[in-house]
DNA sequence: CTGAAAGCGCTTACAG
DNA sequence: CTGAAAGCGCTTACAG
């Protein structure tokens, strides 16, 4: 049988309370006593039963998710995943809430985080804005002993404990590699449709994309970046304009949101003249476009995985336990029409 | 506060034992009493604390992993992942063991499963061989109330409860799509290197690969399949022979193991004359070949995910709980040199 | 500095 | 058919 605190107490000739003190590193135990207990722990190969400990402590975890109010499919899906997790959390002694803040507004994000801090939760997950004030605020949360996980978009050098999201430079590089290989190789010109260069993920994707093209496919010409602010209408207009202006626009990398607009613009083209298109995030519209051939590949991050991973990590951090890096790595899914889930 | 069994007992005016009987659907409760308790449960919105229940019951889970003895990197890695999970299981009231059986030997697999059944574990995970005797045996295990998960390789129509592995037809289709697009498009010939057509995953990958090529890239010619029995030496010889015989062999899809041999054969070629190569499973050697350009893409299944997923599912089945399909779906990883983990 | 006792939310003999 | 009491492995006041 697995040894319990009773076994340790008996072996060391002390009471349960003393075993507990040693086990939890609490003060008020004589050196010799502590040693006896530690020996018993080691020789019995004791492993604490966390579930029993949590039951005794009445321990519950309290986590807050700070999410941007954003009407794109990905963010809506992300929020839905958090809600689903909340729905499942009743059985798990975990209380979670969602705090919504205006998108791309560092001030609002900081204010929300300050309010959350006053509530002293065990952990906070946030879609970060990479900005000095936000970094400073996260620092304060960490100092207050709150576990911090950035979600989807990371913070530069900061004291967040973990990032639950994809490597966006690698994502951009992957898009560049696929684009280079999918192109016909003669006189190729490629357009990039982005949301905003203010956001770290978009900057990083662009950086990765450009570096692979220049390293491995130097013959490909790249047009100036179109910033459509993740707005489908703007994206549509910009893509139409680009197609009109640049004959031989054979490739488009859409690294932000607003793909509905992009797709509308592309659908008007004859199938043979359509450019190679690589986009991000699998949504109803990108999935459809993948199936009918309007889009050639979709890079995706799985919002459900990100949320579940964030919760696992938050819990581990709250318990001072290690996280399983391999399990928590968020992968860049590459979807072609043939491996859609 | 979350309601407990005490709250229900008080509300219904019964004892804890009766509440427990109703909660666990045990017999020996009068209709009216049961009804009172059920009403209390519903009106209080009671959710059972599984951890507390397991503690009280002294419940431990016992699972067996039946794995083939196989010296390829993937199977070695799979076993290592199970061992890692066993290492972590001490804290989780879970006992797991590994039973090794000769590879590709249905009789031995059945014998091992029968032995496992005598031990009456809560669940079994096995790398299946798709064979009538195995299916019948799995049927018996399921009838004995043992949860069954197939791992990596599935069983045809059978009563296994879950399959923790990738969709191999989709994997083959994905390989076909990438191959078609990566090829230069003029006078292409493609070779397929397989382990054995006796194994279901290999058959399915081939099927998917061929169907995409014939549907979407009909101009590509496909050479007869090389069956190298997952042996690096055999694979090397076969690939060398094929390269010698078929001028214009521009693509190779390696859908089984033995990639070390394939890579050796390819490394002798001048970089410009190397075919497009798509292989399965990220190992030390395929990773290296991806980085140096010998291999163009690697399709991968994450053995760690498969093992952790199998355990989660086994536990859920043992508890009669639903599984989160989206979480347990094993994805086909596509690795290019730019998105290596 | 140390221990006896009660309790977390649930289940299990046992008695009636 | 129903209930009182003890116990799972741990923690927490409280007393000494």
Image (tube, coloured by chain):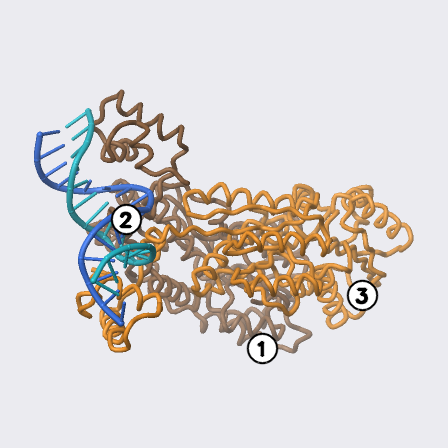
Chain colours: A brown, B orange, C cyan, D blue
On screen, residue A60 above or below A295: above
Q: Is residue A93 left or right of residue B130?
A: left
Q: Measured from the top left, where is residue A163 in percent x and y?
A: 42, 48
Question: Camera-side residue: B137 or A68?
Answer: B137
> Which quarter of the rendering shows the N terminus of chain B?
bottom left
Instruction: Please provide percent x and percent y for residue B175.
Output: 69, 60
Taking depth in this image into account, of D11 and B277 the one nearest to the observer is D11
Where residue B124 sits, quadrant-wise, is: bottom right
- Residue at position x 48%, y 69% from top? A235
SS of the residue at dot 2?
A: loop
Label 2 neighbour load within 10 Å: few <14, some 14-19, many 20+: many
Q: Which residue is the site of mark 2?
A: A122
On the rendered structure, is B107 left or right of A35?
right
Name the residue: 56% across, 60% down. B148
Nearer the viewer's eye, disc 1 or disc 2? 2
Circle 1 residue: A267
The circle drawn on residue B297 is: none
Residue B7 visible in the shown view: no
Callout 3: few (<14), some (14-19), or many (20+) C-alpha neighbours within 10 Å?
many
Quadrant of the image occupied by residue B133: bottom right
| Residue B220 badge | 3
Chain ID for label 3? B
Is there one chain holding both mark 1 and mark 2?
yes
């Amino acid at each position: 049988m697995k040894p319990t605190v009773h076994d340790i107490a008996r072996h060391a000739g002390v009471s349960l309370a003393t075993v507990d003190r040693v086990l939890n590193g609490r003060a008020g135990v004589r050196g010799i006593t502590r040693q006896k207990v530690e020996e018993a722990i080691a020789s019995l190969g004791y492993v604490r039963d966390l579930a029993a400990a949590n039951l005794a402590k009445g321990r519950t975890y309290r986590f807050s998710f700070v999410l941007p109010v954003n009407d794109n499919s990905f963010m809506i899906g992300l929020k839905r995943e958090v809600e689903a997790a909340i729905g499942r959390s009743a059985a798990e002694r975990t209380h979670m809430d969602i705090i919504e803040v205006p998108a791309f507004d560092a001030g609002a994000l900081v204010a929300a985080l300050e309010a959350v801090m006053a509530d002293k939760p065990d952990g906070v997950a946030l879609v970060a804005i990479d900005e000095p004030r936000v970094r400073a605020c996260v620092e304060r949360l960490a100092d207050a002993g709150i576990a911090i996980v950035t979600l989807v978009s990371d913070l530069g050098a900061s004291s967040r404990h973990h990032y639950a999201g994809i490597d966006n430079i690698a994502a951009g590089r992957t898009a560049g590699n696929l684009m280079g290989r999918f192109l016909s190789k003669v006189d190729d010109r490629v357009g990039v449709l982005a949301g905003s260069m203010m956001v770290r993920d978009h900057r990083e994707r662009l950086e990765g994309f450009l570096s692979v093209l220049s390293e491995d496919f130097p013959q490909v010409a790249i047009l100036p970046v179109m910033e459509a602010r993740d707005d489908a209408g703007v994206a549509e207009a910009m893509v139409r304009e680009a197609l009109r202006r640049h004959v031989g626009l054979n490739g488009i990398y859409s690294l932000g949101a607003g793909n509905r607009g992009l797709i509308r613009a592309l659908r008007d083209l004859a199938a043979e003249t359509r450019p190679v298109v690589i986009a991000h995030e699998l949504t109803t519209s990108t999935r459809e476009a993948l199936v009918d051939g309007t889009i050639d590949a979709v890079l995706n991050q799985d919002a459900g995985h990100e949320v579940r991973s964030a919760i696992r990590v938050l819990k581990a951090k709250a318990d001072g336990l290690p996280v399983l890096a391999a399990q928590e790595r968020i992968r860049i899914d590459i979807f072609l029409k043939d491996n859609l889930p």
